[in-house]
């Protein structure tokens, strides 16, 4: 049995969301003091629901799929950082064996990326043409955990710049098929031109969304389309631009512009009421376990600390349909030495990590 004492932040701000203590009995949360408790371990501090990385890739590295031992290390790294719920935004590896491990985070999967032929990172995606899009979306909708991942835009070697990958009619039919099968659809998008057609086609979320402008932000807000900005990934744009400038100067200049206005873009989306969630894009070229840095980047962009926290805790769990710290829920929580609402940087230094009722870190 565990007794968590201090301040239990079961919600963002309301008084009835903040408790002085909770107990963990048989792996479940209760706010009622158990009777006759013995051998109780006490953990003191500021408690949050297990953190959420809403965009990462377990089973993937910069070169493609990885073996099970590498996937395990990725999941353990997330767990030790307090991330106990992962939204895997595309992976070619079968990681369902992780679901049977009580010591590893829960994963919400989007199946494998679906990309246009020769328009994405090699070995990552199904690379297909538009006529096959509906069929592949249906396949991944059945394989995933309620999500499908499209590559909405990528560099076009003929134009030398970012451009949309899918014709509007085909992508609308594919999204409709995913919805029919009970799955939501998200898309990788860097550029401006791919966004409005995807929203009008019924997309549920856009990853990165660096191309948002004053014309498309109201459309996202009106339709309730979420974004996961992955700001620590966007920080790599200047290096990417430098590496590709000799061959694709237009693309390199475009990537630098998107990077330069990244904070203004995210703040404008927040101010307009666009739902925003925290994700790192770990598993490609970025290391796992960096969600604390991503939340700090959201704050740097101008999002209030409590809302940035919610993007990786209460709000993100609700969005993904997973419980937080509620009566009878599985005890997945993280304890810190200080109030994360006062300084989100404490997220990078958890004091204790509790997964399924056991202290694992």
Image: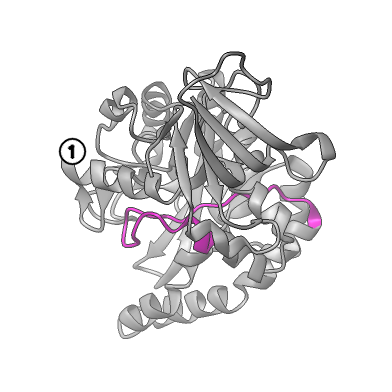
- Residue 112 is left or right of residue 40, and the answer is left
Residue 233 in percent (x, y) is at: 45, 64
In the rendered image, the quadrant that contains the C terminus is top left
Q: Give coordinates of residue 78: x percent, y percent.
A: 38, 48
Which residue is at a point 24% across and 37% down the rendered structure image?
93
Asked whether residue 292 is drawn in magenta, I would say yes
Q: Is residue 269 visible?
A: yes
Q: Main secondary structure of the magenta part?
A: loop
Q: Is residue 323 visible?
A: no
Label 1: how many Cα within 10 Å (few below 14, some 14–19, many 20+): some
Q: Which residues are magenta?
A: 272-294
Depicted 23 relative to depicted 46: above or below: above
Q: Is residue 336 magenta?
A: no
Nearest the eye: 81 or 136: 81
Which residue does the numbered mark 1 point to in the structure image? Answer: 68
Q: Residue at x 48, y 59 (%)?
A: 349
**Image location of residue 158, percent across then percent down:** 36, 68
């Amino acid at each position: 049995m565990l007794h968590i004492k201090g301040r239990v932040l079961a919600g963002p701000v309301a008084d009835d969301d903040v408790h002085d203590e909770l107990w963990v009995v048989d792996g479940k949360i209760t706010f009622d003091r158990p009777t006759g408790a013995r051998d109780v371990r006490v953990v003191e501090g500021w408690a949050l629901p297990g953190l959420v990385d809403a965009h990462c890739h377990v089973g993937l590295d910069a070169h493609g799929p990885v073996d099970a031992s590498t996937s395990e290390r990725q999941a353990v790294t997330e767990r030790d950082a307090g991330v106990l719920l992962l939204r895997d935004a595309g992976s070619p590896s079968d990681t369902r064996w992780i679901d049977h491990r009580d010591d590893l985070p829960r994963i919400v999967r989007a199946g494998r990326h679906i990309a246009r032929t020769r328009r994405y990172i090699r070995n990552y995606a199904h690379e297909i043409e538009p006529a096959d899009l509906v069929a592949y979306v249906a396949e991944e909708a059945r394989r995933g955990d309620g999500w499908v991942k499209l590559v909405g835009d990528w560099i076009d070697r003929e134009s030398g710049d970012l451009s949309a990958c899918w014709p509007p009619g085909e992508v609308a039919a594919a999204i409709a098929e995913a919805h029919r099968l009970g799955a939501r659809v998200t898309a990788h998008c860097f550029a401006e031109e791919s966004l409005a057609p995807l929203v009008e086609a019924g997309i549920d979320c856009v990853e990165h969304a660096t191309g948002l402008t004053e014309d498309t932000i109201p459309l996202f807000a009106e339709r309730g389309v979420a974004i996961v900005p992955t700001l620590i990934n966007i920080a790599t744009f200047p290096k990417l631009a430098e590496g590709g400038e000799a061959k694709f100067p237009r693309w390199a200049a475009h990537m630098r512009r998107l990077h330069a206005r990244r904070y203004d873009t995210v703040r404008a989306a927040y101010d307009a009421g666009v739902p925003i969630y925290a994700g790192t894009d770990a598993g490609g070229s970025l290391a796992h376990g960096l969600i604390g840095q991503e939340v700090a980047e959201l704050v740097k962009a101008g999002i209030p600390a409590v809302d940035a926290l919610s993007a990786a805790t209460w709000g993100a769990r609700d969005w993904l349909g997973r419980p937080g710290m509620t009566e009878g829920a599985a005890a997945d929580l993280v304890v810190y030495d200080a109030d994360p609402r006062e300084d989100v940087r404490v997220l990078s230094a958890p004091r204790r990590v509790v997964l399924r009722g056991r202290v694992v870190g």
